[in-house]
Image (cartoon, helix red, strand yellow):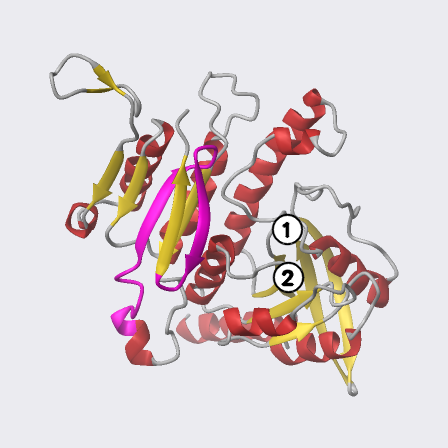
């Protein structure tokens, strides 16, 4: 779990938050559901997942759909999963005005994305160049 | 056979052109989607689509009102309105408790809300021909859900109109919405008060003909 990582001495538990930084290269070889599972498995463990390159719109749509299916409103499985908080930098304004922009997928290739459990991550500030988030310990 | 197939195909295309366009009303929770759907349905058919409420996720199933014929300038456009649950990436049942809803009911509503959001996403990928994206003009439009949803709609090449709702309220800022999504037409309105509905219907007829 995120908070019970091992300290420098290899024995004592260390209080902290695990951050998974996932490279574009790692995501490139995965199918849509594999990407979604990689993200949601990390987030459901309480981790913050940062994608070097974000998801495409169809994958984002499926991420929302799968996330909804995994929410346990009554926390019946003891996980209290209420969904995800997701932020993308830059702000997601895509240049689809020209054929070249669409063919090259302009802007869609470089949107750094931060995803975390909704009950632990809160966006304090966001603009086109900057995201500031607060991560709560459990 | 080739000729027959071709004739059949042409005939079905001819009829398909006359079929109503399915226009999905999308947006975050509490933007006024059902109020708008009811306003449009009442103005042109006399019936409502569903109950309105200040409680988020009141609409937890996509509801369709078929064959809404909107007449503008001597011609008409025939649409099916699909009122969808507000899209979000999180649902916490404790938020319902703040609206004096009992815990059991709050849990049930949350479960239905998650199913409703998933259903809305499915409709967007598979079953709508155009989108009206409704935003509450008193709130910040530059949220991740809005930018993601607009991106998803754009990737489907669907015609989209952005409606800046609740302009009857003092804090409303239509310009803030125009600045957030300059690539799309933004139409100001108050679905509750019926303000600027003439322009709303002009734009629906223009975009979804």
Which residue range is magenta in the image? A103-129
Q: Is residue B20 visible?
A: no
- Evaluate if marks 1 and 2 touch, with contact meaning CB atoms under 8 Å apart: no
- Nearest the camera: B94 or B27? B94
Please determine if labels 1 and 2 lie on a single subunit. yes
Q: Nearer the viewer, mark 1 or mark 2?
A: 2
Q: Residue at x 54, y 71 (%)?
A: B159
Would residue B207 be found to the left or right of residue B75 on screen? left
- Nearest the camera: A84 or A133? A133
Check the image and name the residue furthest to the left. A9
Give me the disc on residue B134. Answer: 2
For numbered disc 2, what is the local secondary structure? strand
Magenta residue check for A119: yes
Magenta residue check for B165: no
Number of residues whose C-alpha sits closer than 10 Å to that of mark 1, classed few (under 14), some (14–19) or many (20 or more): many
Residue bearing mark 1: B84
Q: Position of residue B102 (x, y in %)?
A: 74, 23
Q: Is residue B75 above or below residue B85?
A: below
For numbered disc 1, what is the local secondary structure? loop
The C terminus of chain A lies in quadrant = top left
User: For residue B36, what is the image quadrant?
Assistant: bottom right
Number of residues whose C-alpha sits closer than 10 Å to that of mark 2, classed few (under 14), some (14–19) or many (20 or more): many
């Amino acid at each position: 779990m995120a908070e019970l990582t091992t300290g420098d001495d290899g024995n004592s538990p260390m209080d902290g938050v695990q951050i998974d930084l996932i490279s574009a290269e790692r995501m490139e070889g995965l199918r849509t559901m594999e990407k979604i599972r990689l993200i949601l498995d990390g987030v459901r463990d309480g981790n913050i997942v940062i994608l070097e390159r974000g998801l495409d719109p169809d994958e984002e749509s499926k991420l929302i759909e799968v996330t909804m299916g995994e929410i346990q409103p009554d926390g019946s499985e003891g996980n209290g999963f209420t969904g995800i908080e997701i932020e993308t930098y830059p702000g997601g304004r895509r240049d689809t005005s020209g054929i070249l922009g669409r063919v090259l997928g302009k802007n869609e290739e470089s949107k750094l994305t931060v995803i975390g459990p909704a009950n632990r991550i809160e966006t304090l500030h966001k603009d086109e160049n900057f995201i500031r988030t607060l991560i709560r310990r459990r | 056979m080739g000729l027959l197939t071709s004739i059949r195909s042409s005939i079905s295309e001819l009829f398909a052109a006359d079929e109503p366009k399915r226009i999905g009303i999308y947006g975050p929770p509490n933007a006024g989607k059902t109020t708008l759907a009811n306003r449009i349905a009442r103005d042109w058919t006399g019936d409502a689509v569903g109950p309105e409420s200040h409680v988020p996720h009141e609409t937890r199933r996509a509801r369709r009102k078929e064959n809404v014929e909107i007449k503008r300038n001597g011609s008409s456009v025939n649409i099916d309105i699909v009122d969808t649950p507000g899209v979000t990436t999180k649902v916490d049942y404790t938020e319902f408790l703040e609206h004096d809803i009992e815990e059991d009911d709050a849990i049930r509503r949350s479960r239905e809300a998650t199913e409703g959001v998933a259903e809305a996403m499915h409709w967007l990928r598979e079953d709508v021909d155009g989108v009206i994206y409704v935003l509450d003009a008193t709130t910040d439009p530059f949220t991740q859900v809005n930018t993601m949803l607009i991106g998803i709609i754009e990737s489907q090449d669907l015609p989209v109109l952005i409606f800046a709702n609740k302009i009857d309220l003092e804090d409303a800022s239509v310009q803030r919405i125009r600045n957030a999504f300059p690539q799309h037409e933004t139409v100001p309105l108050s679905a509750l008060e019926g303000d600027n509905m003439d322009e709303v219907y002009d734009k629906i007829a223009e975009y979804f003909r």
